[in-house]
Amino acid sequence: MVVRVSQTRLLAEETFENETFTGLDLQRAALGGKEFYRCVFENCLLQESTWKSARLEACVFRGCDVTRAKLLQTALRGVKFEGSKLMGVDFSAVSPHPELSFTDCNLRYASFVKVNLRKTAFLRCAAREANFLEVDLTDAEFDGTELTGSNFQGCTMTNTDFRRATGLFFEPSRNRVKKTRVPVETAVLLAQSLGLVVEG
């Protein structure tokens, strides 16, 4: 049975399990210190909400606006973002070793600095001008994701799959590349950046 939680109860209580939050206006809400287990957030407005020291495990955000939310020491385990807007969200201060996936999300201007994103899936996302700095992207997947203007520096890209990404460019000398899979368009740009002439 799906349990739908009111906004008043969400703000008042600290622990939630197997519950659904639908259509709530939580802009700038203080959600710090709360624990969510197997919860679903549907079509919620969460812009500039604060999640300091919150814990989310096996949770789903579906159709939510999480623009510029503050994730400070937030524990994220098995958290899925689906069809959600995460513009300008800084994931750099989340708790170590987050487990995340993003599907059909807007990640424009998002920042990932010194974050472990091993095996993270970015599927059909818009990640224009996002920052990936000193991030472990080992075995991560960017299937159908647009990365125009995104910045990759100091990243570990072992077996990272960019084959079906678009707008991708990075400097191999500024990242650790090993079996990094890139589309032909990116390979051409990389060759040209080294002064090579690509023909055919």
Image (cartoon, rainbow, N blue to C red):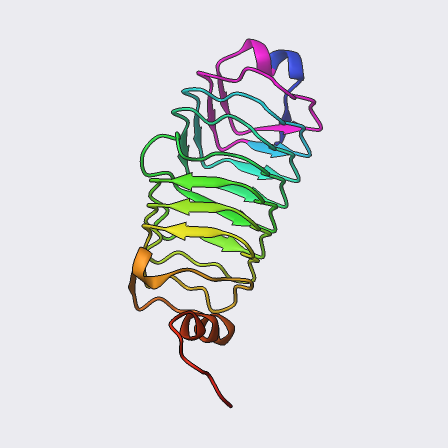
Note whether 150 is above or below 189 in the view shown: above
Can see residue 62? yes
Question: In the figure, 199 relative to 92: above or below?
Answer: below
Classify 43 as above or below 11: below
Looking at the picture, how far across and down is residue 104, in whole percent?
61, 51
Quadrant where the N terminus sits is top right
Q: Position of residue 139 (x, y in %)?
A: 35, 58
Q: Residue at x 52, y 67 (%)?
A: 164
- Farthest residue in the bottom direction? 200
The image shows residue 45, relative to residue 177, as above or below, that is above
Residue 78 shows in this picture: no
At 41% from the left and 64% from the top, the residue drawn is 161
Q: Nearer the viewer, residue 115 or 104?
A: 115
Instruction: Give how far across and how far down residue 34 sits, in percent.
Output: 47, 18
Furthest residue to the front?
A: 195
Going 50% across and 62% down the picture, which residue do you hit? Answer: 168
Viewer-side residue, 23 vs 48? 48
User: For residue 160, which quarter of the picture?
Assistant: bottom left
Magenta residues? 10-39
Judge left or right: residue 126 versus residue 139.
Answer: right
How many numbered discs?
A: 0
Q: Position of residue 101 (x, y in %)?
A: 48, 47
Q: Is residue 89 magenta?
A: no
